[in-house]
Amino acid sequence: MSQKIIIDTDPGIDDTMAIFFALNSPEIDVLGLTTVYGNTPTERGTINALRILEIASRTDIPVYAGAIKPLESEYTGKGEFVHGHDGQGNTNLEPAKTKKGTGSAVDFLEKAIKENPGEVTLVPVGPLTNIAQLLLNNPKIAKDIKEIILMGGNALSQGNASPSAEANIRNDPEAADIVFSADCEISMVGLDVTNQVFMDKEHIDKIVNFDSPQTKHLKKIFPFYVDFLSKFFDKEGMATHDSSAIAYLIDRNLFKTIQYPIVVETLGISRGKTWMGTGMDQLDHNPWEDRRNVNICIEVDEEKVIDLIIQRVAS
Ligand code: BDR
Ligand code: CA
């Protein structure tokens, strides 16, 4: 039985590969894409999502536009130097012919969960504003969500948007904190593992040398991302952030997790840091009290995850 998922995304170069990866995986049934600002503004990201589905010949999957800014702050649009001004590596993707769904992303999420209680896994791979808004509108809905598997956060390692914080969480820490307090199963696929899933030139070549509409598109958009990340990591290649969340969904045995509740710092230089509550029971005031444990990915079988991504994307 395939797993019903909704990908909440800010597409985004690595988001694009993650969407193709999910669409090509028989274990997964993508019910819809919901969009959010982040790597690119929501309007642009929504066009990208529609176009990505057209490239994959999956226009049967609906796209709903979501939040255009964080819950309590402004969107500063800092993803452009990583993903290009269009979120697709400045490749000037041709306009989508298909249209987004009428209604909001949050309404679609709520409807899909209510129609399939206990069956829908949410896979947010961008800032968590839409998911937080869903929980704010209807806190009881958490019990009907099968699981939230999110790409974001950093438990044991440095951030990438600041020394303390990962970009998706740093974009809307207030929203992220609401999500980590939800009463449902949550798994965090953060930088602790996604930075380790590093595709080098040989891996990338296996994808871009394959001949399909999806891989032809990835061939166009990868160079901008690879150029930026190669400088960031001081080696040629790219960290496979969003696809790692899809790999976790398919086979969580490829990851080692630890279980602790998470609180997101919203103040000062640590704004956006995902803090684990490790053995804090003795505190008079325990900020992690009343939160469920999160499955926090801390180790990954890099080779097997990369093999799985290549096998599915280049197919
Ligand atoms: C996350 O930030 C975005 O740039 C990527 O798409 C990914 O979701 C990595 O920190
Ligand atoms: Ca993303």
Image (spheres, rainbow, N blue to C red):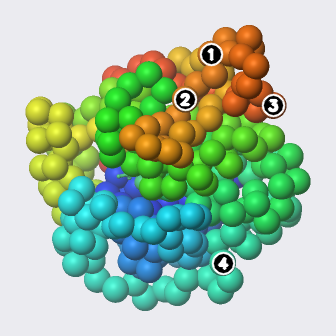
Report how far apart the C-alphas of labels 2 and 4 lie in the structure.
Answer: 31 Å
| Residue that numbered label 2 is attached to | 275
- Residue 268 pos. (x, y %): 44, 43
Between 265 and 105, the one nearer to me in the picture: 265
Q: At label 3, which amino acid type do we have? A: Asp
- Residue 119 pos. (x, y %): 79, 48
Q: Residues within 10 Å of mark 4 (few under 14, many from 20)?
A: some
Q: Quadrant of residue 248?
A: top right
| Residue that numbered label 3 is attached to | 290
In contact (CB < 8 Å): disc 2 and disc 4: no
Q: Earlier in the sequence, mark 3 or mark 1?
A: 1
Some atom of ligand 2 lies within 8 Å of the CB belonging to the residue at label 4: no
Report how far apart the C-alphas of labels 4 and 3 lie in the structure.
Answer: 31 Å
As drawn, 33 above or below 238: below
Q: Residues within 10 Å of mark 2 (few under 14, many from 20)?
A: some
Q: Earlier in the sequence, mark 4 or mark 1?
A: 4
- Mark yes or no: residue 315 visible: no
As drawn, 283 above or below 213: above
